[in-house]
Image (cartoon, rainbow, N blue to C red):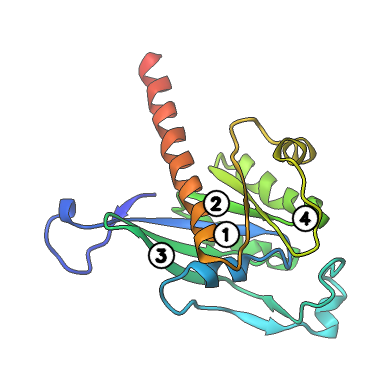
Amino acid sequence: MLFADSDQGGTRENLPVTVKILIAGGFGVGKTTLVSSVSEIRPLRTEEDLSETGARFDLLDGVTGKTTTTVAMDFGRITVSEGLRIYLFGTPGQQRFWFMWDELAFGALGAVVLADTRRLADCFPAIDYFEERATTFVIGVNCFDGARRYDHDDIRAALALDSHVPIVSCDARQRSSSKTVLVTLVEHAISSRAEAVAARTLR
């Protein structure tokens, strides 16, 4: 949902357009890192230490070095241009916290689904969620150190993605790389909505 920020009063035409974007994906894929790297304000985090009890429910394969987990959401903000401000909401990755996704997704322009090529199957719950709700999304392939690099066509086939879904390689630790993924999503969302309007007009 696009809406005008009214912090300073004045006409809506003079105010920046503000959008909400979700950062989703599996446990330990880099959602908190991406929000932190790109946010121009101190990001809000709801991380807690992993407990022995939680470890019974959370799949830690491939992320054995991770010691904390997001239990509610991450929040950050980035100004892409004078007329566009983005609010970022990072979703919790573990299945036991998925009940929060509906609240976080309300009013969102779209989502970035972060992928780790070593654990691609962890993407499926997020992809299924957004496809079922016709939510625009892009895939951000987080290039972890030491992880094998794959052609985007191979990743598309492995995730059974439609041809129109953009795939972008990124390093979630780097601001410029994370910003590129967000801009790709915004452009994809605008293009998708324009195509939908055109299709309705031709009916």
Q: Quadrant of residue 6?
A: bottom left
In the drawing, what numbered circle is on residue 122? 4
Q: What's the residue at 53%, 70% (across, down)? A: 37
Where is residue 25 drawn, in percent x and y? 67, 58
Between label 1 and label 3, give the one nearer the viewer: 3
Check residue 127 in the rendering and tell me which mark sits there, or answer none. none
Instruction: Name the residue carrying label 3.
Output: 78
Indicate the secondary structure of the residue bearing disc 1: strand
Asked whether 95 or 23 is in front, the reply is 23
**Element type where label 3 sits in the image:** strand
Nearer-the-camera pick, 88 or 117? 117
Say which residue label 1 marks.
23
Q: Are marks 2 and 1 in contact (CB under 8 Å)?
A: yes
Q: Position of residue 179 (x, y in %)?
A: 49, 58
Count of marks overlaid on the render: 4
Mark 2 neighbour class, 10 Å CA radius: few under 14, some 14 to 19, many 20 or more? many
* Residue 155 falls left or right of residue 170: right
Q: Are marks 2 and 4 in contact (CB under 8 Å)?
A: no
Q: Are marks 4 and 1 in contact (CB under 8 Å)?
A: no
Instruction: Using the numbered discs, state the Cα–Cα distance from disc 4 to disc 3 in whole angstroms.
Output: 27 Å
The residue sitting at 81% across, 70% down in the picture is 63
Inter-mark Cα distance, 4 to 1: 14 Å
Q: Is residue 95 above or below residue 193?
A: below
Type of residue at label 1?
Answer: Ile
**Which residue type carries mark 2?**
Ala
Residue underneath mark 2:
111
Mark before the other along the chain sequence, 1 or 3: 1
Q: Earlier in the sequence, mark 2 or mark 4?
A: 2
